Image (tube, rainbow, N blue to C red):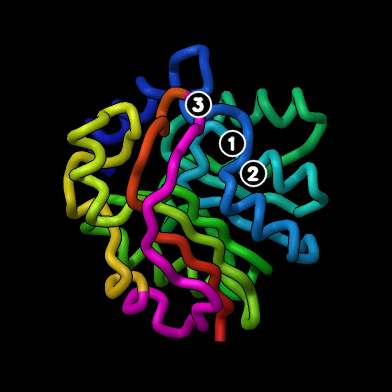
Amino acid sequence: MDNDWLKMWNSRFGQQEYVYGTSPNTYLKEKLEYLQPGSILFPAEGEGRNAVYAAQLGWKVSAFDISEAGREKALKLATKKNVSIDYALGELPNLGYQVDEFDAIALIYAHFPPNIRTGHHKLLNSCLKKGGTIIFEAFSKDHLAFKKKNPKVGGPNNEDYLFSLEELQTDFANVEFLELKKMTIELNEGDGHVGTGSVIRFLGRKK
């Protein structure tokens, strides 16, 4: 992992306030309402807002991130909400998750570096049980134009870190897309995502 990448996230999550707030992502919240709780994995989970919310709904929650500062705040939030989450620190290939381990995976603004992204997506997909659910929301390649107008909306500055519909369909080739759309939305997640942005959302089921 690029040391500058790690330093950036530790610096961002090292501040007292929760960068993206403590409320769950809207799309994730909407989709979890229709799923029976089971085991769920949150990759690149940062400060824990989404993992903690799922735990409050009765899910058995696993999460990981490279940022120690993010993990500390996530565990603090879990304690505050009186729930337990299993939060690993490190890079995905080293964390020992098993094939067919999870009933669901939630990729919420998990913008992995482009040189490892496809490999991570395929590895995560292998950890999902057949018939399991993927919930995804992240910035599309159209988002840079919105960020130039309003930096407060957040997101990567490099188009290579952003997503296209075609790339996701290729990375998750054995997933049935129950919903897949690029859309312009209004974000209000802490101070890190504020304003109009372009995102891709999908709900998928592993074939």
Left or right: where 159 falls relative to 179: left
Start-end of magenta stretch: 169-190
Dots 2 and 1: beta carbons under 8 Å? yes
Mark nearer the N terminus (1 vs 3): 1
* Residue 130 among those drawn in magenta: no
* Residue at screen point 61% across, 36% down: 49
Residue 164 - label: none
Q: Are marks 1 and 3 in contact (CB under 8 Å)?
A: no
Q: Which residue is mark 1?
A: 48
Q: Name the residue at 58% across, 61% down.
A: 105
Q: Is the stretch drawn in magenta largely helix, strand or loop?
A: strand
Q: Percent position (x, y) of residue 85?
A: 70, 41
User: In percent of the image, x 79 and y 36: which residue is there?
Assistant: 83
What residue type is disc 2 on? Ala
Does residue 92 sit above or below 153 in this rendering?
below
Kindly tell me whether residue 49 is visible in this rendering: yes
* Quadrant that contains the C terminus: bottom right
Apparent side of residue 91 relative to residue 157 in the rendered image (left or right): right
What residue would you read off at disc 2? 51
Q: Residues within 10 Å of mark 1 (few under 14, many from 20)?
A: many
- Quarter of the rendering occupied by the N terminus: top left
Q: CA distance from mark 3 to mark 2?
A: 16 Å
Q: Residues within 10 Å of mark 2 (few under 14, many from 20)?
A: many
Question: Residue 190's mark?
Answer: 3
Q: Was residue 187 drawn as part of the magenta stretch in this picture?
A: yes
| Local SS, label 3 | loop
Above or below residue 108? Residue 129 is: below
